[in-house]
Image: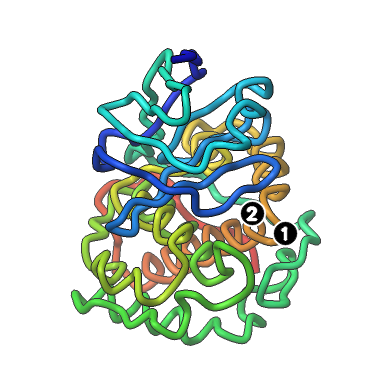
C-alpha cells in the first residue's frame, strides 16, 4: 500500500465512513459520492479548498487520476493500492463577527443570471423575489427558494451560489439560519450533488477558502480587494454569483436596519453601501 501524506483535509468528520465512488473528474478537483448522496472532493493545490475534502499537492493529485473508488475510515482514504493520510485537519468555519461593507463599484464581472456586479442590485430580474423570500424568513417562516435553487448553469448553479453568499453574511453577523434552506433531503431533489455539498456545509457555517478569504477580510477591516479578486476567478460565474449573494444580503440588512428591524444586537456595521 502506497501512502500519500496529503496536505490537509476539511469536513471529513461530517462525512460517513465506507465506500465512495467516482462522481466526476476535473483538472483541479475529483469528486467522489457516497450511497447516501453526499460528496467528497480531492482538491489540487493552488485553487483553494472546499469545506469537505482533501487537499493534495500537484504530484499527489496526478497519482489519483485513475482511482475510481475510495474507502473512508475516519480521516483516512484508501483505494486501488493508495492511502491518503492528511497531515492536518482544518475547520473552514466562519465565526460571527461584524463585517464591513463590500464595495463592488469596480467589479464588471457578469453573473450567471446575466447581470453585472457593479450594476444596481435593484435591476436584477429576481431582486424583488429574493427580497420577498428574505422578508418571509425574517418573519419566522421558511422561505420558498425552489424557484432559485438549481437555477442557472454548472455543477453549482447560479441561484445556489447566491444562497451560499447570503448564508456567509447572515452567519457572519450572527443570525440563526436554521430555516433558511430546505432540509437536506429536499435540497437533494432540487439541485446537483456538488451544489448540495456546498449548501449543506454553508448551513453549518463552513465555506470554501475563497469565500472565507473575502468574509474574513471584511470582518477584520482589511482591504478585501485581493480576496475578492480570487473569489471572482472561481468557476465560470460561481465566484461572481457568490459575491452577488453577499451584496444582496448586505443590502437587505441595510434596509432592515433602516426600518428599525435590527437583524442582530450591537451596532457594528454590516451594511452594503452600493446602489
Residue 187 in the image: above or below residue 75: below
Residue 50's tag is none
Question: Quick one: SS at disc 2?
Answer: helix
Crowd rating for badge 1 (residues with CA inside 10 Å; few <14, some 14–19, many 20+): some
Residue 25 in the image: above or below residue 180: above
* Residue indicated by mark 1: 236
Classify residue 188 by image quadrant: bottom left
Residue found 44% across the figure and 15% down from its top: 1
The answer to the question of whether label 1 and label 2 lie on touching residues, with beta carbons closer than 8 A, is no
Comparing 224 with 185, the one in front is: 185
Note whether residue 272 is visible: yes
Residue found 45% across the figure and 51% down from its top: 270
Q: Which colour assignment does the render follow?
A: rainbow
Question: Quick one: SS at disc 1?
Answer: loop
* Residue indicated by mark 2: 239
Q: Could you tell me how far apart the alpha carbons at marks 1 and 2 are, in whole angstroms?
A: 8 Å
Q: Nearer the viewer, mark 1 or mark 2?
A: 1
Residue 217, image x and y in percent?
Answer: 55, 35
Classify residue 196 by image quadrant: bottom left
Q: Which residue is outermost to the left?
A: 140
Residue 195, image x and y in percent?
Answer: 47, 60
Amino acid at each position: 500500500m502506497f501512502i500519500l501524506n496529503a496536505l490537509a483535509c476539511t469536513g471529513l468528520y461530517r462525512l460517513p465512513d465506507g465506500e465512495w465512488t467516482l462522481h466526476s473528474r476535473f483538472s483541479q478537483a475529483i469528486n467522489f459520492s457516497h450511497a447516501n448522496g453526499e460528496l467528497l472532493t480531492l482538491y489540487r493545490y493552488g485553487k483553494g479548498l472546499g469545506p469537505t475534502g482533501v487537499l493534495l499537492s500537484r504530484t499527489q493529485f496526478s497519482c489519483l487520476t485513475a482511482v475510481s473508488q475510495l474507502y473512508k475510515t475516519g480521516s483516512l482514504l484508501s483505494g486501488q493500492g493508495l492511502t491518503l493520510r492528511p497531515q492536518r485537519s482544518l475547520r473552514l468555519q466562519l465565526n460571527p463577527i461584524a463585517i464591513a461593507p463590500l464595495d463592488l463599484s469596480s467589479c464588471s464581472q457578469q453573473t450567471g443570471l446575466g447581470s453585472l456586479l457593479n450594476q444596481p442590485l435593484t435591476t436584477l430580474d429576481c431582486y424583488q423575489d429574493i427580497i420577498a423570500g428574505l422578508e418571509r424568513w425574517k418573519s419566522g417562516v421558511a422561505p420558498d427558494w425552489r424557484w432559485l435553487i438549481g437555477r442557472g448553469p454548472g455543477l453549482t448553479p447560479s441561484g445556489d451560489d447566491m444562497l451560499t453568499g447570503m448564508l456567509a453574511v447572515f452567519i457572519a453577523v450572527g443570525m440563526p439560519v436554521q430555516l433558511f434552506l430546505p432540509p437536506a433531503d429536499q435540497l437533494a431533489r432540487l439541485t446537483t450533488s456538488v451544489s448540495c455539498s456546498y449548501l449543506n456545509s454553508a448551513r453549518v457555517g463552513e465555506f470554501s477558502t475563497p469565500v472565507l478569504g473575502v468574509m474574513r477580510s471584511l470582518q477584520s477591516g482589511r482591504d478585501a480587494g485581493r480576496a475578492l479578486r480570487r473569489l471572482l476567478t472561481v468557476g465560470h460565474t460561481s465566484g461572481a454569483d457568490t459575491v452577488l449573494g453577499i451584496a444582496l444580503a448586505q443590502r437587505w440588512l441595510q434596509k432592515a436596519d433602516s426600518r428599525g428591524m435590527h437583524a442582530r444586537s450591537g451596532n457594528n456595521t454590516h451594511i452594503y453601501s452600493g446602489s
